[in-house]
Each structure stands twice: as C-alpha cells, then as structure tokens.
Amino acid sequence: MSEPAQDRQRPLAVFDIDGVLADVRHRLHHLQSRPQRWNAFFLAADADPLLKEGAARLRAAQAKHDVIYLTGRPERNRALTAAWLAAHGLPTEPLHMRPDDDFRPARWVKRNTLRRLARTHTIASVLDDDPAVVAVLSADGWPVELATWLPHSSTLQSAQEQQGRT
C-alpha cells in the first residue's frame, strides 16, 4: 500500500514577495500621488531590485521545504511577477495571488489562502513584511516571521491593509 500524497510532500515554506524579496521603494511614489496610480505601481514591479536577505532565506529554505509564494499582488500581474522571479533566478511557481476583484486587507486574504493550503500541506514557515499579516497568522498559531530588512512604509501598509491592493 502506498503512502497518502500528503505524507510524501515536503513541508511548505511560504514567502511574500513585496518587501520580502522585492524592494518596492522606487515605485511607492505612484501610491503617494492623488489620485493613486495603481496600474503604474504594479507595472513598475519589473524593475524592483532583489532583496538579498529574502532571496538568501528562500534559497536556504529550498533544502528542506517546498517553497511557495503568497502575495497580495493581484492576479492580473501574474506574468510580470513570474518573469521578475525568473530574472532573479528564483522559482516561479507555485504563486498564490490575490483575485483581481478582492480588496480585503492582506491579512484576511493570506489567512484564508494559508488555511486552504494547510488542508493538504504542512506549513513549516511563513515570511511576510506586513505586521498585520504576521499578527493574524501568529494568532492562528502559524510559524510566521516578520521580514525586517526593508524599512517600514506607511504607504505600503495602507495599500496592504486599508485598500486591499497588494
């Protein structure tokens, strides 16, 4: 008799992208303008510098875990995001993104996705830069760590938590 699929899978290491792997600071000005320029903000993501600390952690996690991405970026940016990951030598899948019409705060979107993933996988770690996401996931008992290598941005936090955009 063979093992169930879940028993053969490696635990998951879950990585956010913006603020963990991608340095978004060069495009925050699109969100500071009035009206905010969301399309320009996301289209500029292809020029994000790689955050070396996040990339090093992802590569280290690959030794014992299957790495997945859980980002608040909208689904319409899948091709751009996958191309950016590939350009930096990172795996491009699995990539869990926010549905284009979902404007809930990032903490709730990510919590729901993580709960769904946990039905079939063991979650070994979660790395996110959003303190609200970390607080909610930590309260649920997930092994979550706050990425602190990119200075905190109130503009990005507002986009993630109040506007449900990233």
Image: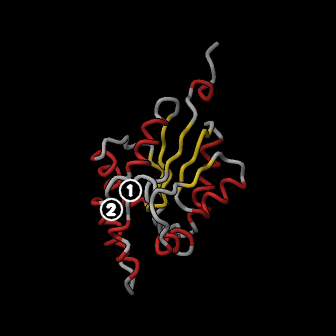
Q: Is residue 3 left or right of residue 78?
A: right
Q: Residue at x 35, y 78 (%)?
A: 37
Instruction: Say how many tags the image has.
Output: 2
Residue 153 image offset from top left, x and y in percent: 47, 70
Name the residue located 31 percent from the left edge and 72 percent from the top edge: 40
Q: Tell me which amino acid carries mark 2.
A: Ala
Which amino acid does the dot numbered 1 rest on?
Answer: Ala
Q: Position of residue 2 (x, y in %)?
A: 61, 15
Q: Are marks 2 and 1 in contact (CB under 8 Å)?
A: yes
How far apart, in angstroms, are the residues tagged by discs 2 and 1?
A: 8 Å
User: Helix or strand or loop: what does disc 1 sit on?
Assistant: loop
Q: State whether residue 1 is above or below residue 104.
A: above
Quarter of the image with the N terminus in it: top right
Q: In the rendered image, which residue does mark 2 sit on?
A: 45
Residue 74, quarter of the rendered image: bottom left
Give me the residue at 57% from left, 24% from top. Answer: 8
Residue 22 badge: 1
Q: Residue at x 56, y 70 (%)?
A: 161
Q: Nearer the viewer, residue 11 or 21?
A: 21
- Of the two numbered discs 2 and 1 on the same chain, state the one appearing first in sequence: 1
User: How dense is the environment of label 2, judged by Cα within 10 Å: few (below 14), some, or many (20 and up)?
Assistant: some
Instruction: Give percent across and percent down for residue 64.
Output: 52, 29
> Which SS class for mark 2?
helix
Q: In the shown orientation, is residue 67 left or right of residue 120?
A: left
Point out residue 77 in the picture as x, y percentages from the top left corner: 36, 59
Quarter holding residue 80: bottom left
Of the two numbered discs 2 and 1 in the rendering, the one whose residue sits closer to the viewer:
1
Furthest toward the bottom, the residue is: 34
Q: Which residue lies most toward the top here?
A: 1
- Residue 121 is left or right of residue 164, and the answer is right
